Image: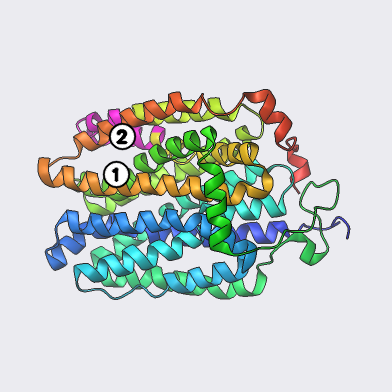
Amino acid sequence: MKKAKRLHYAWVVTPLVFVTLLAAAGIRAAPGVLMVPLEGAFGWSRTVVSTAVSVNLVLYGLMGPFAAALMNGLGVRRTMTVALATLAATALMRAPWQMVLLWGVVVGTGSGMIALVLGATVVSRWFDRGRGMVMGILTASTATGQLVFLPLIALVVERWGWRAAVLTVAGVAAAILPAVALFMRERPADLGLWPVGAEAAPPPPAGGGNPVGTAFAALAEGVRSRDFWLLSGTFFVCGLSTNGLIGTHLVPACIDHGIPEVRAAGLLAAMGLFDFVGTTASGWLSDRWDNRRLLAWYYGLRGLSLIFLNAAFDLSVYGLWLFALFYGLDWIATVPPTVRLAGRCFGAEKAGIMFGWIFASHQLGAATASLLAGLIRTDLGSYWLAFVSAGGACLGASAMSLMIGGGPEGERAALPIPAAEGDLA
């Protein structure tokens, strides 16, 4: 086994994972655009659609630790293939229970199998240095998924109806399947390579074991750790203030204020573009700075942005673009520091599964916000209380972030030394 002299195969695996995460994010975000059309087509209340989205978000998160264990046992390529096939089979629904089954259970399970846990697993296997930077790029794929898919979905809904939009996103998942089957590889060792930046051969992988038992054993270890609760608590707020609230309800809130659906989806997509920049930069920073302080800044600024959102609707379109800029740069910038802190607290071998449970907390927060924001809108006729409450929760998470772990010196000792940019090729 020796280092590669040509382009490392990690740079084939990474774009493949990026595209897979991108497609999964676009499919999972579709209900935000479909909510109002489904209300009009079937007469469903916003609470009914929000319930399906909540089920989706819960399963999306709860699949994380089991998906990580499946990747260790069944393999990354097979897990990705099964998940994409599941996402491609969600095109028909005519009743509320079908909405919950297909977009709640099926899409939630399929997208959860190839969520950010996939990125964390691949990065830990294929990269020894510069992990934060690569994780930032893969994390940004979820924002790029919205950038690519949401305006497209809104346009298809406007011209051909909601069912054509559902068929479109399902077809994208089916199109990615062959590439995953042909080009995805499990580990660098399968090709006689070391991870990028490695100075020695990595140890052989441990046996996969029973995925369910492995996942629950990791949870049992986590619940005894103060850092686990702090990471899970802050990530709960992260999900509450992103996927569940803005990702699901921003477009309907814009429509409530007279902003057309396509323009509202374009605003959300622009936030995805800003987030791509912000999350990639966050990955770079997480290799170099105290991750606890980064999280404190991210949550604090996000909270202020959400508190400002109600005023943004009254400041003409420029107020919303100002919100999109500041909130977008911060949208999921929390992921790279959280992944690195999980690695520091629980070790590189357990980082994927432990992050899976932490990510489950993220999605429980998202599901909570998705449902409660729908109930608030139904009862009050406005989202203002949902936005302000989420902003306050973010300010609380900012304070919690500073309580994680033992400080930057311990972090540098436990994590790999960051690579220079030239070492990543």
Dot 1 alpha-carbon crowd within 10 angstroms: few under 14, some 14 to 19, many 20 or more: many
Earlier sequence position, callout 2 versus callout 1: 1
Question: Residue 347 in the image: x percent, y percent?
Answer: 67, 42
Check disc 2 and report the residue beneath it. 390
Residue stretch in magenta: 306-326
Q: SS class of the residue under badge 1?
A: helix
Q: Is 167 situated left or right of 72 in this image?
A: left
| Image height of 207 relative to 251, above or below | below
Tell me where residue 346 sits by quadrant. Answer: top right
Question: Residue 399 in the image: x percent, y percent?
Answer: 44, 23
Q: Is 261 situated left or right of 273 in this image?
A: left
Q: Main secondary structure of the magenta part?
A: helix
Residue extending farthest to the right is 2
| Image height of 188 relative to 299, above or below | below
Q: Residue at x 24, y 54 (%)?
A: 50
Name the kind of residue labelled 1 in the image: Ala
Look at the image and say whether residue 202 sits in the magenta stretch. no
Residue closest to the eye, 129 or 110: 110
Q: Residue at x 40, y 40 (%)?
A: 236
Tell me where residue 419 sits by quadrant. Answer: top right
Name the kind of residue labelled 2 in the image: Ala
Q: Are marks 2 and 1 in contact (CB under 8 Å)?
A: yes
Q: CA distance from mark 2 to mark 1?
A: 8 Å
Dot 2 alpha-carbon crowd within 10 angstroms: few under 14, some 14 to 19, many 20 or more: many
| Image height of 259 relative to 300, above or below | below
Check disc 1 and report the residue beneath it. 369
